[in-house]
Amino acid sequence: MGTLSDVNFLVKGYRGGNYICPLANPNFSPKQNIVLPEPLSEIGYLYAHGCKGLLFLDDYRGHCLIWNPSSGEHKVLPPSSLEKLSPPAVDNRFFLCSGFGFDSKSEDYKAVKFLRNYFKDEFGFNQEVVQIDEKDRIQHQVEVYSLNRDSWKPISFPQQARSFFEPATYIDGVHYWMAYDRSGKGLIISFDYADEKFSSFPLPHYFVFGKHSVHLMEFEGSLAAALYPFRGTVTFDIWVRKGNSWTQKFTTEPVPGAQRLLGFLNKGEQMFIEGSNNQLLLYECATKEMKDIGIRNDNPGTMHITHYVETSVQLNSGSLAKKRKLHDLPDIKNKKV
């Protein structure tokens, strides 16, 4: 298509429906929204993860596809591998969160999805695939998709985590999610797309549960955590992960009208911010000037920004993936043992 050559960022949001809006250089002016692939045009809220010019779009019911916004080509992914592993009396289930990244060792794009099952009775499961939380009667499962293989496979759920949260962030082959362990303590779970293994490490010691919100993002090639208060005057405490420790990089001055930090530009000199009216703002740290980009959402916390670069990657070479239809999770809410 060639219409995105001047674009470095894509904004994913929801305003009467899902939208993807490109921001044009050099002033981040919003361009016309990109038309979503037809299979997703009528679906509710979507998650979006970008990597090397491709977008992975999915929802809580298991609909998912990979899309090249530049060429318009998309690939509907096969049904979940986890359906046949689910117990016969699950009361309800949904996909909790997801990720998308690149495995540089095998030159392969991969996606990861987390399924949460709620059930009432006790079952026996393969512990390498399924983790059961006896307290809340919740069963978690995880699967990984390989574009090279065009298939999903189940993997082990990270034992130390109980809940995951979007938005996540992707940096150089590794995905990071905010999570809570079984005692309710906050932590970060990482997933390496090359070895398909999970790891975990603590949040900055400054974090206080119930006092701070956390947003994970990239800062100069490293993982950063932006901590900010739930209420009152908003200042952002920026912590950067180097090796096995956190270092406090800087603390911003109070940012009027800010609700959530979305990302940095120019080594922290500028910030993308979601404002108190669910609008996208560009904040100049030195001058404290705030620019309204002109993009708004219906609901708070549903805006996401991803880096973008055009790619010529073809998604359907030698496959019949274009003929696939989106697959819902089976209706199991009323299913009995």
Image (cartoon, rainbow, N blue to C red):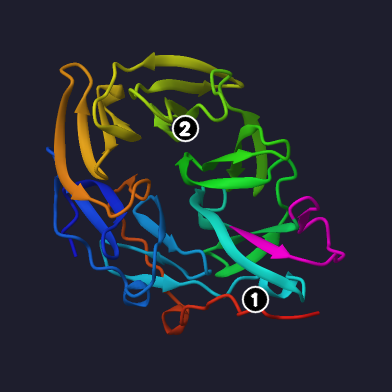
**Dominant SS in magenta:** loop
State the extent of the magenta-drawn residues as a range.
114-136
Eyeballing the image, is 155 above or below 186? below
Q: Can residue 270 be seen in this view?
A: yes
**Position of residue 202 in the picture relative to residue 294 (left or right):** right
Q: In which quarter of the image is residue 208?
A: top right
Q: Nearer the viewer, residue 166 or 135?
A: 135
Of helix, strand and loop, which one carries label 1? loop
Task: Give the residue displayed 29% in from the left and 65% down from the top.
Answer: 17
Above or below, comparing residue 68 to residue 182 in the picture: below
* Horizontal arrangement in the rendering, residue 252 relative to residue 280 (left or right): right
Q: How far from the left and from the top, in percent, is residue 84? A: 72, 75
> Would you identify the image quadrant in which residue 275 lies?
top left
Cα gap from disc 1 to disc 2, whole angstroms: 33 Å
On screen, residue 44 versus residue 327, left or right, reads: left
Name the N-terminal-most of marks 1 and 2. Answer: 2
Direction from residue 29 to residue 143 in the image, left or right: right
Q: Do the residues labelled 1 and 2 touch (CB within 8 Å)?
A: no
Mark 2 residue element: strand
Q: Look at the picture and state if 104 lies above or below 230.
A: below
Q: Which mark is residue 333?
A: 1
